[in-house]
Image: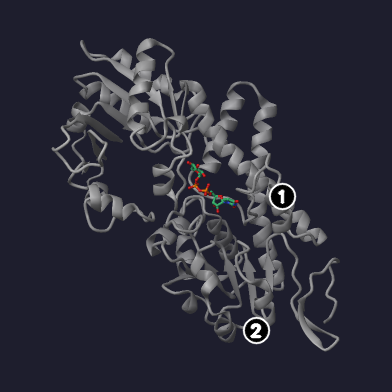
Amino acid sequence: SCSVRLERVLMEDLPRCDTCLVIFHLTVCDKSVERINQWNSEKLPIYEPGLDDVVKRCRGRNLFFSTDIAKSIQEADLIFISVNTPTKTIGNGKGRAADLKYIEGAARMIADLATSNKIVVEKSTVPVKAAEIIMKILRANTKPGVNYQILSNPEFLAEGTAIVDLVEAERVLIGGEDTPDGQKAVQELCWVYEHWIPAKNILTTNTWSSELSKLAANAFLAQRISSINSLSAVCEATGADVSEVARAVGRDSRIGPKFLEASIGFGGSCFQKDILNLIYLCECLNLPEVAAYWQQVVSLNDYQKTRFTRKVIESLFNTVSDKKIAILGFSFKKNTGDTRESPAIHVCKTLLDEGAKLHIYDPKVEKDQMLYELTHPYVTSEPESVRKNMEIHSSAYSAVTGAHAIVLCTEWDEFKELDFKKIYEVMMKPAYLFDGRKILDHDALLEIGFHVQTIGKRLLKGVFYIVNDNVKCRKVVQLSEHKDIGL
Ligand code: UDX
């Protein structure tokens, strides 16, 4: 949770931009002493490009990290509730509904401690009508002279590009109550954002539209990925190339080119969780057809992860038992160390279940984090055996040495720069490479001698040369039928 104290200061008081008359004092609060200590240390607890610079520039000036939640609440004008809303693991709605216990806890804490008017902003992604919970708790516990307004202000930043997404937000969404006081609170928050976001990019709605829009935006984005991933299976079966299909489809300005990158499946803390939330909401509202529609986006994502892993196993003569397999990339996408719902977890789990020995390398994921993910009770009932069968490396080259196959799970740029000739030399033969992100130069890999498989495109395991009028052309053959043409 974090709180903002708005302080009007004179031009000469503090360092500021030329036009700015306001310094925002931002205090990030957490109950965890360890977490706050990390935020106050040189090594921040998360990796996010550009974040270190922002924290270094502002920490101790107008950005503070504190466990003194009471003081922060009392001093704040605006309080952002940014707590975790994990999927419920027990009881009603288990596996789909969001667990709002931390939201409720934060609201109760504010009600307990606030001694002046507050605008409480729901920043965490929540089910529609969650603001009602906050409202009920705050208004049932209001002290004399204290007035609350509750706003919904969902966050649309993506990991890996968070700072740019915040500084140059395409849109900021603010939902509030349709009452004079509600609208006044909406305008206060608009005023904060207007210090760096053009007013035309700030959208205001009612509270429930704002909450639903967040779930809808993530559901739409995930649905595009599942759509292109479904077509990647058709491409592999027909000889079409999913990148070409995406390019052709995305040229239609009504569709647009973004989020049409076929992959081994989407991951991250938001997409699956938010769609499951939406599904649960639809079920509760007795809209089973709508729930089934969105369920298919998640099911297709599971299918894509399974389909890719099955391809790896089948290509390796249908057994990976005791084979050394190098996993390149473990985070759910590049430029983040976040592993939540990473498709790499599914790939690794299946290969471990089949008896493979995994050698994993990721530029930003810590060893303990990989161990945590792969030994979690949801993933295995035999954590000791998992520990024995996985080794974590600090370089891609050491991970691939002696491997039967490389499975690329995350699209880190550095993987494109690897010396694959050198890698081929140190691998077992035949050397297999499965590019789950379509980022490598497949022609070059085939020429080196790799057996290559990727998403949404069928590749031949060889290269041949056509001599045509004395011009020697290299040509990689793509099969249009599922047979080895023996070149
Ligand atoms: C997402 C939303 O983009 C963001 O607006 C919201 O606030 C939080 O959820 P994030 O999860 O950080 O952000 O990453 P995003 O870039 O959306 O990628 C999610 C997953 O989809 C990743 O695993 C990524 O690799 C995958 N993806 C993305 C694809 O497979 N293909 C694509 O074309 C795009």
Classify the position of the C terminus by image quarter: bottom right
Residue at 23% x, 33% y: name it: 22
Q: Position of residue 332 (x, y in %)?
A: 51, 55
Mark 2 near mark 1, Cβ–Cβ under 8 Å?
A: no
Residue beneath label 2, please?
Answer: 429
Q: Few, some or many C-alpha atoms within 10 Å of disc 2 (few <14, some 14-19, many ≥20)?
A: some
- Label drawn at residue 230: 1
Q: Position of residue 13 (x, y in %)?
A: 13, 38
Nearest the eye: 167 or 478:
167
Q: Residue furthest bottom?
A: 470
Q: Position of residue 278 (x, y in %)?
A: 57, 31
Which image quadrant is residue 458 in? bottom right
Horizontal side, residue 176 vs residue 64: left or right = right
Q: Tag 1, which secondary structure?
A: helix
Horizontal side, residue 108 vs residue 354: left or right = left
Nearest the eye: 360 or 175:
175
Horizontal side, residue 120 vs residue 124: left or right = left
Comparing labels 2 and 1, the label whose residue is closer to the camera:
1
- State whether residue 205 is above or below residue 308: above
Which image quadrant is residue 290 in? top right
* Residue 104 visible in the picture: no
**Which amino acid type is marked by label 2?**
Lys
